[in-house]
Image (cartoon, helix red, strand yellow):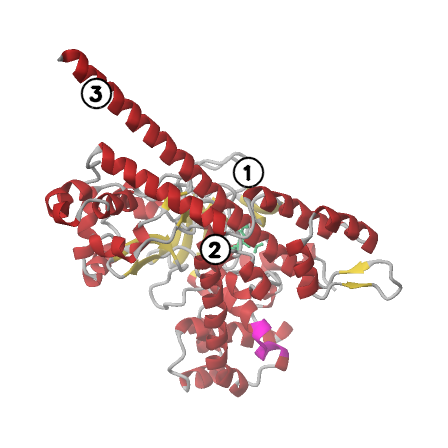
Amino acid sequence: METEEKKLENLLKWAAHLGITDSSNGVPSHSHSSLGHSLTISHFPLAGGRGLGAVRGIREGELILKVPKSALFTTRSLLNKDHNLSHAVNSHPSLSSAQILTVCLLYEVGKGKNSWWHPYLMLLPRSYDILATFGQFEQQALQVDDAIWAAGKAVLKAEIEWKEASKLMKQLQLKPQLVSFKAWLWASGTVRILSQLMHTKIIGSWILVSSRTMYIAWDEAGCLCPVGDLFNYAAPGEEPNGLENVGGMMNASSLTEGDAEGILDSEKFNPQLQRLTDGWFEEEANAYCFYARQSYEKGEQVLLSYGTYTNLELLEHYGFLLDENPNDKFFIPLDTGIYSSGSWPKESQYIHQNGKPSFALLSALRLWLTPANQRRSVGHLAYSGCQLSVDNEVSVMKWISKKCHGQLKNLPTSSEEDNLLLSTIDKIQDYKTPMELKRVLSTFGGEVCTFLEANGVQRGKNGGELSFSGKTKLSIERWKLAVQWRLRYKTTLADCISYCSEIINSLLCKNVSTVRTKQLMR
Ligand SMILES: C[S@@+](CC[C@H](N)C(=O)[O-])C[C@H]1O[C@@H](n2cnc3c(N)ncnc32)[C@H](O)[C@@H]1O
C-alpha cells in the first residue's frame, strides 16, 4: 500500500503535469511538483487538518495558485472523455446537475487505477461530518428544534436524491458498494464540499452573501478543483453592514429576483461581495485563480473564505464549525404576529453570535409591541432602526430576555452540563478498557449511556479491551460537533439575556436622571 506521503507526491507530480502551479507569475515551471514556490501541503490540527501553508512570505492580493480549466473535474470534462457515461447520463434528464456530478465521481472511483483522476481521487477525504451523515442520535443531540429539523431535512434530501439517481448508477453497472447510500453520502458530500465553494446565491428577494458553489459559469453543480480544494476555511468577517444595518435594506423586499441576479451577474455592484471570496474562474487565463486575501508569513496556513456561513450552515455544507464565527447567528421562536406586523424577512430576525439582537429583530419587535392603532404613525421610525420610546424599548428587551430564558429552560441540558459532556466525550475516545469507561460514566451518565447503547459499543470477546468500530468513532465526532453547536447556542442566548439587562438598566437609569433633572428645574 502506498504511504500518504507517496500519494501526495504522486498528486503534486500529476498536478504539475496538468499545469497546476503556485508560481507567482502563474506560469507552470516544468518542475516535478505543482507546489513549492508559494505553498506546501501541511497539517494544521487546530484549523482544518490537512491544508496549505506558505513556504515564503506572501503579500495580500498575490496570485498563489492557478488551476487550468483542463484540470477541473466537471461533468462536461468527464462526459467528453467517456461515451458510455455520456450516453447513460443523457438518458436521465430529470437528474439535477449535482446528482450527475455525484454519479460521475462514483463512476470514476469505480475505474480504480485506470481512472485518469486516480492520483487526485486517492487523496479525497474518506468521510465527512456534514449534517446529512447525522444519525437519529446525533440529530437529537443538537437539541434545538431548528437544527434538528435542518439535520433531518438534509438526511431526507440525500436519501431522495440517492434513490432518484440509483437507476442511472445501475445502468452504469457500478459495483454494489458504490451504489450504496453510504457511498452516495460520501460522493455527494465530496461534491458539496469540494465543488461548493464560493458562489453568491439569491434566496427569494434576498441577496445572500453566504456562498454555495465553487462557481463555474457553465455548470450549476460547480467543479472539483484539484489542489485548489486543499485550502481550509477562515470566515471573511461579519456580513457587510449594508445588509444588516442600513435602513435601506427594508427596500430589499422590493428587489425582484431578476433584478438581483442582474446586479450580481455584473459582479461590479458591490466590491464587498468580491472580497468575500478569494478565488474564481478567470476566462482570460482559462484557469481557476486563487489570490491571497491577506499577507502571510512563512509557515502560516493560507486560508480561503468560501463565503459567509453560520455554524449550522458550516456543519450542513462542510461538516465543521468554528469556535469563533463572526457570521454566526441564532434564531429564537417568534410569535407569528411578529412576522406579519412588519415586512422584515424571517431570516433577518435573529441574535448575533455576540448576543445582540439583529437590527430587523429589534425593529420588528418595537413595532409589534406598539398598540396596533399607533403602528402606522411610528412605522417609519421602527424601519429606520430608531427606538420608539423608553417604555417600548424596555418591553422589547424584556420580551427578548424572557424568550431566551424560556428557550434555555426548555433544553434538556445546561451549558455547564454540555461543557462537562464535551470533556467526557474526549475521555470516551481516550479510555480503552471497560473499567476505565466505567469511571468516566460514573462522573457523567445520561446521554453518554444512550450513545453507548445506540452504537452498541461492545466489550472485546475476552472482556478486556473496549472495541470502538470505525462507525462508532465517526459517530463520536458528530456527537461532539452537535454538542459544540448547542453549547454555542446556549452561550449566545445567555449573552443576549445579559445584553438585554444592561440595556434595560441603562435606559431606566437615564429615565430616572431625566425625571430628576426635570423636577430640579421646576
Ligand atoms: C475544501 S476542504 C479543505 C481541505 C481538507 N482539509 C482536506 O484535507 O482535504 C474543506 C474541508 O476541510 C475541513 N475544514 C476546512 N476549514 C476548516 C476549519 N477552519 N476548521 C475545521 N475544519 C476545516 C472540513 O472538513 C471541510 O469539509
Majority secondary structure of the magenta segment?
helix
Task: Name which of mark 1 and mark 3 comes first in the sequence.
Answer: 1
Nearer to us of marks 1 and 3 is 3
Residue 58 place in picture, x, y as percent: 48, 37
Residue shown at 58% from the left, 60% from the top: 138
Residue 367 place in picture, x, y as percent: 21, 46
In the displayed structure image, the side of residue 204 where residue 6 appears, left or right:
right
Residue 135, can we see it? no
Amino acid found under the numbered disc labelled 1: Glu
Compared to 18, does 80 lie above or below?
A: below
Nearer to us of marks 2 and 3 is 3
Compared to 36, does 468 lie above or below?
A: below
For disc 3, the marked residue is: 515
In the picture, the quarter occupied by the C terminus is: top left
Residue shown at 51% from the left, 82% from the top: 166
Amino acid found under the numbered disc labelled 3: Val
For disc 2, the marked residue is: 144
Residue 238 place in picture, x, y as percent: 37, 42
Q: CA distance from mark 2 to mark 3?
A: 43 Å
Q: Which mark is residue 300?
A: 1
Q: Secondary structure at mark 2?
A: loop
Q: Secondary structure at mark 3?
A: helix
Q: Nearer the viewer, residue 470 or 390?
A: 390
Residue shown at 45% from the left, 67% from the top: 153
Q: Quadrant of residue 513?
A: top left
Which segment did they paint magenta? 177-183
Residue 147 place in picture, x, y as percent: 46, 58
Disc 1: CA contacts within 10 A as few (<14), some (14-19) or many (>=20): some
Q: Quadrant of residue 93?
A: bottom left
Q: Nearer the viewer, residue 228 or 506?
A: 506
